[in-house]
Image (tube, helix red, strand yellow):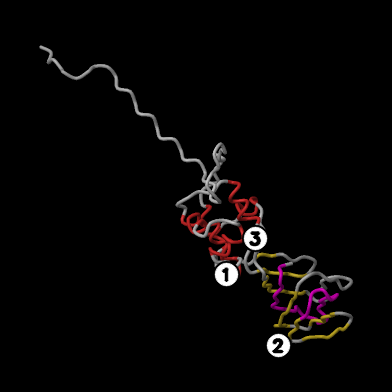
Amino acid sequence: MKTKTTQDARPRRKSAAPKASPAVDAGAPAKPGTERSDVEPSAGVGARLRYVRELHGLSQRELARRAGLNHGTIGCIEKETISPSVGSLRKILDSLPMTLSEFFSLDPDVETQIFFQRDELLEVGAGGISLLQVGHNLKGRPLQVLLERYAPGAETAAQPYSHQGDEGGVVIQGQVEVTVGGVAKVLGPGDGYLFSSRLPHRFRNVGDAEAVVVSANTPPL
């Protein structure tokens, strides 16, 4: 004997899934009749923006001022309580300046590394000169630190060259001839140098053994 049921046998209609919120134009309220972009930047924008802002030594208030945004907007984006539209994000990055491609190529988890083992240094040298760089992606950083090793007779260039910036260093081992602005001097262990990179310069190992130098350049080469 079948039990009679009082339930309605008709299938229930499923409730519609909530629509995803569009990206927020964090700069200002939308004008009537103006559609906002529904293209939303990828996840992790908040952490990336905080990293870039701190890299440039800016407060949230100062970055907002430069980008022409409301005071609390940067903080909300970094906390990811709001998601900026591509247009708003580009407006923020233009005030640094930085492109969207550069912004999304950053990896804050990697870029905030503080300590580096020897095998984590990046080789950027060639031609008998080893240049081990501390840190990999120096985009946006004002400083480059190098551990330089020169084979006997190795030189940075056949003729002195110049570029923007400043550089300095200390010879750790060997004999290095440093030529700056037409003046040459041989430096040994413990000797140092500091000069404007706009002056034509060249480094050459004039000894019979490997020469080692620890140097710093600003901005990075």
Q: Is residue 213 left or right of residue 105?
A: right
The answer to which image quadrant residue 142 occupies is: bottom right
Element assignment for label 3: loop
| Amino acid type, residue under disc 1 in the picture | Gln
Q: How far apart in space, not on screen, are marks 1 and 2 (Cα)? A: 24 Å
Residue 205 inside the magenta-drawn segment:
yes
For the residues labelled 3 and 2, say whether their Cβ atoms are less than 8 Å apart: no
Mark 2 closeness class: few <14, some 14–19, many ≥20 residues within 10 Å: few
Which residue is found at the position 73% from the left and 69% from the top? Answer: 130
Identify the mark at residue 96; answer none if there is no mark.
Answer: 3
Query: Which label's residue is closer to the chain start, 3 or 1?
Result: 3
Give the residue number, with chain letter if any, for mark 1: 117
- Residue 77: percent from the left, percent from the top? 50, 54
Which residue is found at the position 71% from the left and 82% from the top? Answer: 170
Identify the mark at residue 190; answer none if there is no mark.
Answer: 2
- Residue 199: percent from the left, percent from the top? 84, 76
Question: Quarter of the image containing the C terminus?
Answer: bottom right
> From the viewer's perspective, is the residue at label 3 or at label 2 nearer?
3
Closer to the camera in the image, 152 or 52: 52
Give the number of marks: 3
Query: Which label's residue is closer to the chain start, 1 or 2?
Result: 1
Q: How far apart in space, not on screen, are marks 3 and 2 (Cα)? A: 39 Å
For the residues labelled 3 and 1, say whether their Cβ atoms are less than 8 Å apart: no
- Residue 8: percent from the left, percent from the top? 22, 18
* Region of the chain picked out in magenta, as a range: 195-220
